[in-house]
Amino acid sequence: MQSWPAAAFPDLAGDACASPLRLYDSSTQAAVEVAVVGPTARLYVCGITPYDATHLGHAATYLAFDTLVRVWRDRGLAVDYVQNVTDIDDPLLERATRDGQDWREVAARETALFREDMTALRVLPPTHFVGAVEAMEEITAFVVGLLDAGAAYRLAGPHGDDVYLAVGTAAHFGQVGGLDPRTMLALSAERGGDPDRPGKKDPLDALLWLAARPGEPSWPSPLGPGRPGWHVECAAIAVNRLGNAFDVQGGGSDLLFPHHEMSAAHAEVATGTWPFARAYVHAGMIGLDGEKMSKSRGNLVFVSRLRAAGVDPGALRLALLSSHYRTDREWTDAVLLAGQERLARWRAGVARERGPSGDALVSAVRAALADDLDTPRALRLVDAWCEASGQDTGAPAECAALVDRLLGIALSTDPFIGPS
Ligand code: 5CA
Ligand code: ZN
């Protein structure tokens, strides 16, 4: 799929960050040092299901991983970044039926809106932006490989044979989420699994291929016409582009189980290697009025609506980055207002002729972000720099470049250099 245009990534003087990059890894439940081997970091982030894009929960999650991409690039690394689009799945079909629209139109329209929102928010684009539909052949080949390896089985259904992964064939199954079987069963039932389906060898076995249902889209395959399950989509797309043991698998915390557990299990069986990813990093949930913001609940605030209402995307970024990416947090008008006020203060700060040391600010912000992407601390450091006075005439430009490069916000009000 076509990705979106990249915002500028300005140069910044000074030494590279001396602190190792540490991220909280859900599988070990600890902050771990993420030491990239070689010149390229490899990242997979679970993308949208395009039927109601882009709400602030999506935006917060992609901003968290954008911060990671920026930190890696700041360290001189290239980033091989893969993001999928689940452009065929039950909820998308249900929405299209409800609205009397073609599911392809819904997916194309919402994906286009997502691209516009990501561009406006200056989120750096993935290297590979891959739709499930365009990856259909590789996903089917992946399922066939699992069947051939004896890790999957057919289960007769009303419309033909469906195919399931036998999770017991994955030696490390359960190690991504570290959850007990009862919790796994409960979450599986809640999040799209079918633990109660009769005939499954293990209630947690994951659907790999769904035989074509009447009136639903399907694709030809050696397994018969049908469409893939959700977890295998991300396993195939990731493994085929990043290989195994890539650096970070990311997404919101709602994906830890079953999605990331299952994708890792699929990949383990398909490649015969472990781990799938070296760290599993999860962003907290954005809520509204005490509930998780979600398409199914319908309590959504859309990036596009805020943009249309004249909200500066830089203020939106500051609002979402003002709390730590791992915390579940509420979206309120006050959070947005604080982001808008902060943006104004920062713009005034870099419009000064001089300020406190720019180099000190750069190294402090780099150290904050190296510490599990501590953006609240980074924001407070820039606040403090804007509030204090000093004699460094190069500092305002240095601060603006820092904020642009690492936090993705264009502060300059010079019409020739931004904000875009
Ligand atoms: N297509 C799948 C992933 S393969 C999916 O979960 N799509 S989604 O549209 O539901 O979510 C897209 C991304 O936004 C996922 O990483 C998800 O974890 C994250 N997300 C969804 N809701 C929220 C929320 N309220 N707060 C933070 N992140 C969220
Ligand atoms: Zn995914």
Image (cartoon, helix red, strand yellow):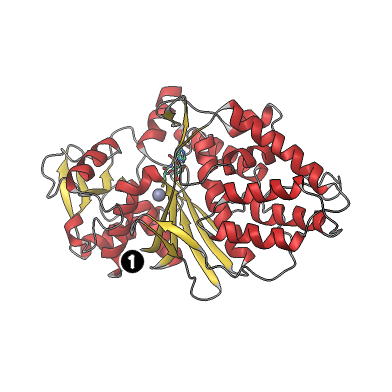
Determine whether, in the image, residue 180 is placed left or right of residue 300. left
Percent x, y of residue 328: 44, 39
Percent x, y of residue 46: 44, 50
Q: Secondary structure at mark 1?
A: loop
Q: Which residue is mark 1?
A: 275
Q: Nearer the viewer, residue 117 or 299?
A: 299
Percent x, y of residue 254: 37, 42
The answer, for residue 299, to whether it is visible in the render is yes
Can you say whether 195 is above or below 243 in the image?
above
Q: Residue at x 15, y 38 (%)?
A: 196
Q: Amino acid at mark 1?
A: Pro
Determine whether, in the image, residue 391 is placed left or right of residue 307. right
Can you say whether 210 is above or below 14 in the image?
above
Q: Nearer the viewer, residue 169 or 359?
A: 359
Q: Quadrant of the C terminus?
A: top right
Percent x, y of residue 208: 27, 50
Can you say whether 394 is above or below 412 in the image?
below
